[in-house]
Amino acid sequence: MITLRHVEKVYPLRGGVFYALRQISLTVQEGEFVSIMGNSGSGKSTLLHILGLHDGAWSGEYTLRGEAVHRLDQAGRLALQKRHIGFVFQSYHLLDDLTVYENLEIPLSYREMPRKEREAVVCDALDRFGIVGKKDLYPSQLSGGQQQLVGVARALIARPSLLLADEPTGNLHSDQGREIMALFRQLNRAGTTIVQVTHSAENAACGTRVIRLADGMLVP
């Protein structure tokens, strides 16, 4: 599913450079559920955003489902992202001028899905996440936990083959967080590859493997 070879992310500074990521080489097999752990500033979220094709300013080689990402232009990367990746952002990234319903519908519009089918899929997601009563509200009218639930629903609605999640339960109550992780396990058993960034040992234990970062480097 994922192969990285010597991936680096460098920021130029006065008097030198800062390595946010340094010589990252790893493989994630299809069907794995991988957790990335490390202290704040270790490079976890930076790595996840490179995997999610949100960051193009890096060096090295990245292959996703047989496609050499490092050789694709921006349009090619965006097309690959829309086809395969769902992303749960730590800071939600919902569109403020769209309702909950409209935020959920957007990923389906990329798949050229007929309107009636989109309506059915969105309604199912609203029911599954217990947010039917919020469908006509805007993100500013929701609590942080509610926004996170909408963000998770949006990431999953198009059934991506690769789910990337940055602290997916960080803004949820404990019971909601456990429900989300149970859903992730269910999706993983059904074949979805998952990579999550987490500080939670409990969440990491839900996966099949833990990758640890320190100072931008992989550590044993």
Image (spheres, grey):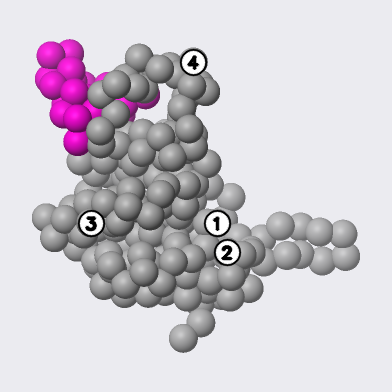
The numbered dot on residue 97 is: 4
Q: Are marks 1 and 4 in contact (CB under 8 Å)?
A: no
78 shown above or below 15: above
* Element on which disc 1 rests: helix
Categorize mark 1 by other alpha carbons within 10 Å: few (<14), some (14-19), many (20+).
some
| Sequence-first disc among 4 and 3 | 4
State how far apart marks 1 and 2 are (Cα): 5 Å
Categorize mark 2 by other alpha carbons within 10 Å: few (<14), some (14-19), many (20+).
many
- Nearer the observer, disc 1 or disc 4? 4
Give the amino acid at mark 3: Ala
Q: Residue at x 37, y 74 (%)?
A: 210
Q: Residue at x 13, y 14 (%)?
A: 116
The numbered dot on residue 62 is: none
Give the amino acid at mark 1: Thr
* Element on which disc 3 rests: helix
The numbered dot on residue 46 is: 1
Categorize mark 3 by other alpha carbons within 10 Å: few (<14), some (14-19), many (20+).
some
| Sequence-first disc among 1 and 3 | 1
| Sequence-first disc among 3 and 2 | 2
Q: Position of residue 142 (x, y in %)?
A: 46, 27
Give the amino acid at mark 4: Asp
Give the amino acid at mark 2: Gly
Q: Which residue is mark 3?
A: 182
On whether residue 118 falls in the magenta region, the answer is: yes
195 shown above or below 180: below
Q: Which residue is mark 2?
A: 43
